[in-house]
């Protein structure tokens, strides 16, 4: 039933044996022959005192992750026989997330603000979370559509060329957040996600601005969801190691951006430090320890083939080879791009072809999703 709603190019992509192999679990969740990770996580009993120290709770989190991964390797029948727990591994993760909010370290900006008490860091969000829109997205990669996409307000990056600048950064200090988005609690967020799935979404796609500053509420919303559906993290991926630990076991599919091949370009255009170290660390982690089902999005930027695109493809081929890559040619000089003449145009078709040829040389799988 759901598969009839796909975009025609999805059929072509799914006929590719490598796509089937690399996204096998995702496909099986769509077909209901596998159980989504977050549902399995709810069966992992977790007894803890929420007043315990963060260090002790983090230690317990590591133990629960091991327990979870052992269950994940069991066959589906024994997984189906497991009972949903009143207090589970997800409750623990969500509790730690709210503790991190008191000294925010969700992303590597590590603002250290107390968001619970109303302080705001670069993303301009306190503890309250706002959804700007939620709809079935047909423009994502073919194997992901229709995608139940939920857009949040507030971004931890400051990309000068942002195409979503109205919900990422342009509102900061100018408009009241309540005027441009709807405040949600965990139950409401879960209801939005489930409605998208009931309407035909084949995944729940957490996106932004960026979902990282909203991580605590996304985790909490998992407690109120119960449909067997892929949870997908669509992000700039500038998470801290600690916050990635909170979500790594619950996400079935990853959709990270990999924009810059070096720190200088990242700092210049997104105002971000240590981009390369953070992104490569996080990508390696989801590839080796997470679901490993990943589409890396690389937006080809004008005049950035040698400094960004090629080092990125070298890294992917060597370090995260199970990933599929979307080589994106749709860069548009939006927002403040006119202040940077070298990126104030669209990439040429010869730049895009050069990147694709380089990917071919490295044997990177990109065609089915680009
Ligand atoms: S999510 Fe990132 S940008 Fe926002 S307050 Fe936390 S550390 Fe700062």
Image: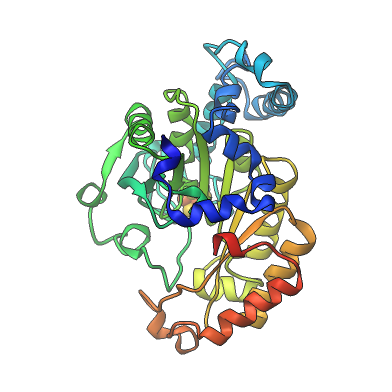
Q: Give the x, y percent position of residue 58.
A: 67, 29
Side of 130 relative to 25 (left or right): left
Q: Quadrant of residue 261?
A: bottom right
Figure check: 305 above or below 274:
below
- Dividing the picture into quadrants, the one containing residue 202 is top left
Q: Where does the image place residue 138, in percent across and percent down from the top left?
A: 38, 53
In front: 76, or 73? 76
Total labels drawn:
0
Q: Nearer the viewer, residue 3 or 257?
A: 3
Q: Could you tell me which quadrant the C terminus lies in?
A: bottom right
User: What residue is shown at x 53% (from left), y 26% (from top)?
Assistant: 95
On the rendered structure, is 330 left or right of 334? right
Which residue is drawn at the image coordinates 45% and 52% (left, top)?
Answer: 210
Name the side, left or right, on which 67 lies relative to 105. Answer: right
**Residue 78 can be seen, yes or no:** yes
From where the camera sits, is residue 111 visible?
A: no
Q: As displayed, is residue 21 above or below residue 321?
A: above
Q: Residue furthest left?
A: 179
Q: Residue furthest toward the right?
A: 318
Residue drawn where x is 50% and y is 82% of the image: 347
Q: Quadrant of the N terminus?
A: top left
The residue positioned 35% from the left and 46% from the top of the image is 136
Which of 367 and 337 lies nearest the eye of the viewer? Answer: 367
- Residue 70 relative to residue 330: left or right: right
Image spot of residue 249 (x, y percent): 63, 34
Q: How is the image coloured?
A: rainbow
């Amino acid at each position: 039933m759901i598969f009839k709603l796909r975009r025609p190019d999805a059929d072509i992509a799914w006929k590719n044996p490598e796509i089937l192999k690399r996204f096998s679990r995702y496909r099986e969740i769509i077909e209901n022959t596998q159980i989504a990770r977050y549902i399995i996580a709810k069966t992992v009993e977790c007894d803890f005192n929420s007043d315990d120290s963060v260090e002790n709770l983090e230690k317990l989190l590591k133990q629960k992750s091991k327990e979870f991964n052992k269950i994940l390797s069991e066959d589906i029948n024994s997984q189906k026989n497991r009972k949903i727990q009143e207090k589970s591994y997800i409750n623990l993760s969500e509790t730690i997330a709210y503790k991190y909010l008191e000294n925010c370290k969700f992303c590597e900006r590590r603002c250290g603000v107390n968001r619970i008490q109303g302080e705001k860091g670069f993303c301009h969000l306190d503890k309250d979370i706002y959804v700007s829109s939620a709809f079935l997205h047909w423009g994502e990669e073919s194997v992901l559509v229709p995608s139940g996409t939920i857009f949040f307000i507030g971004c931890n990056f400051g990309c000068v060329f942002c195409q979503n600048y109205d919900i990422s950064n342009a509102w900061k200090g100018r408009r009241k957040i309540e005027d441009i988005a709807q405040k949600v609690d965990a139950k409401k967020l879960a209801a939005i996600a489930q409605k998208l799935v009931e309407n035909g979404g084949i995944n729940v796609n957490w996106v932004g601005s960026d979902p990282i500053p909203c991580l605590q509420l996304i985790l909490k919303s998992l407690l109120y969801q119960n449909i067997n559906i892929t949870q997908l993290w669509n992000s700039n991926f500038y998470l801290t190691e600690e916050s990635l630990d909170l979500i790594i076991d619950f996400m079935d599919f990853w959709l990270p951006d990999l924009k810059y091949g070096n720190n200088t370009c990242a700092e210049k255009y997104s105002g971000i430090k240590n981009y390369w170290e953070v992104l490569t660390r996080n990508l390696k982690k989801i590839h080796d320890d997470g679901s490993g089902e990943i589409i890396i999005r690389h937006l080809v930027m004008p005049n950035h083939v040698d400094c960004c695109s090629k080092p990125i493809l070298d890294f992917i081929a060597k370090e995260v080879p199970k990933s599929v890559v979307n080589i994106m040619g749709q860069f548009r000089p939006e927002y403040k791009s006119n202040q940077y003449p070298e990126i104030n145009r669209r990439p040429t078709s010869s730049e895009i072809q050069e990147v694709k040829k380089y990917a071919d040389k490295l044997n990177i799988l990109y065609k089915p999703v680009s």
